Image (spheres, rainbow, N blue to C red):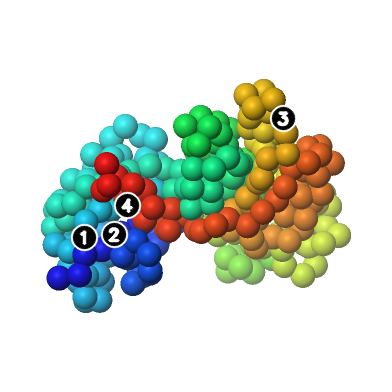
Amino acid sequence: MEKYYIGMDAGGTGTTVLVSDGERDLFQTKTEGLNCNSFPRERILKSLQDAAADLEAGGFPAAGCTGIGIGAAGSNNPAAAGLLKDCLAACGFRCPVSVCTDADAAMYGAFGEDEGLLLISGTGSICLGQADAGQTRYRAGGFGHLIDDEGSAYAIGRDIAAAVVRAEDGRGPQTVLRDILYGHLGISSSSELVGYVYAMDHTKKEIARLAPLISLPGTESDEACGQIVAKAVAGLLEMVIAVHSKMQARCGRSGFPLVLHGSVLRGNARIAGELTETLFARLPGIRIIQARADAAHGAVGLARKLSST
């Protein structure tokens, strides 16, 4: 039986499951999210069972796995690691399991153990930094959508909805976002919008999925859209500056490499462009580079590291 590792990049809205022999990618599938702060145990177990079934069908039974690395949103919760390990055991996996945040997996994929900063703006947002061969870590943001996640897809989606209702009651400028949002959701009034946002079966991912509307044609010169973009850029910039300042104090220099990661920074050229321009102005010497690998490959690397210790 072929032995293999599994890396899981479990973000806020879905999970990429990557199978590797440590050198080559062998198989990949997707399943639902694994955030124990957002989903009950039964849903997480079902997601892992679906992934296990796909792996089995692809020729990778649980018995052949020598290590699993999971980068999961919500795994700062002390109960997360135990829950995920229990669910994997219920799916037949008996190998060592390493659980970290999805941001930590992305950081390992981007830099390995080398120094650098990683800014993520996906469903949520966070900035991480590391120095001293990965032994010294820094963080800003990433405290969840209820109290944080500035500049994230969730925050942008929330601000789009807020701009529409503010325009309707006279607190904000009139905006093209009203017709765009109502057309996207198939609704025609602010009361229906409230019903959508607060529907019990809607999670933060439904709000995060509204974020791309800020990039549609006709939004470029809209005042409300400009305000939303400026707010997102300011929130992301604030996190990078906070982490960079800590690393500069520690290392006595600046000019660290920075990786930009996540659906917002990949999918919204306006936000990425304005952020990059401001970063170069505020942090001379900072270098924006491409990640060595993605979070799923980072999770594979963590699985290999755990299995070799």
Above or below — where is 75 with respect to 221?
above
Give me the residue at 42% from left, 58% from top.
Answer: 296
Rounded to the nearest angstrom, the CA distance separating label 4 from label 2 is: 7 Å
Mark before the other along the chain sequence, 4 or 2: 2
In which quadrant is the N terminus drawn? bottom left
What amino acid is labelled 3 in the image? Arg
Label 2 near label 1: C-beta < 8 Å? yes
Q: Nearer the viewer, mark 1 or mark 3?
A: 3
- State which tag comes first along the sequence, 3 or 4: 3
Residue nearest the observer in this picture, 107 or 75: 107
Residue indicated by mark 4: 304
Q: CA distance from mark 1 to mark 4?
A: 11 Å
Discs 1, 3 touching: Cβ within 8 Å:
no
Give the Cα distance between marks 1 and 2: 6 Å
Residue corresponding to mark 1: 65
Q: Residues within 10 Å of mark 2 (few under 14, many from 20)?
A: many
Q: Label 4, secondary structure: give it.
A: helix
In the picture, the quarter occupied by the C terminus is top left
Neighbour tally class for label 3: few under 14, some 14-19, many 20 plus, Cα within 10 Å: few
Residue behind mark 3: 253
Which amino acid, by three-letter code, is at mark 2?
A: Tyr
- Residue 273 image point, x, y percent: 77, 55
Is there a contact, CB below 8 Å, between mark 4 and mark 2? yes
Q: Residue 5: which disc?
A: 2
Left or right: where 156 falls relative to 206? right
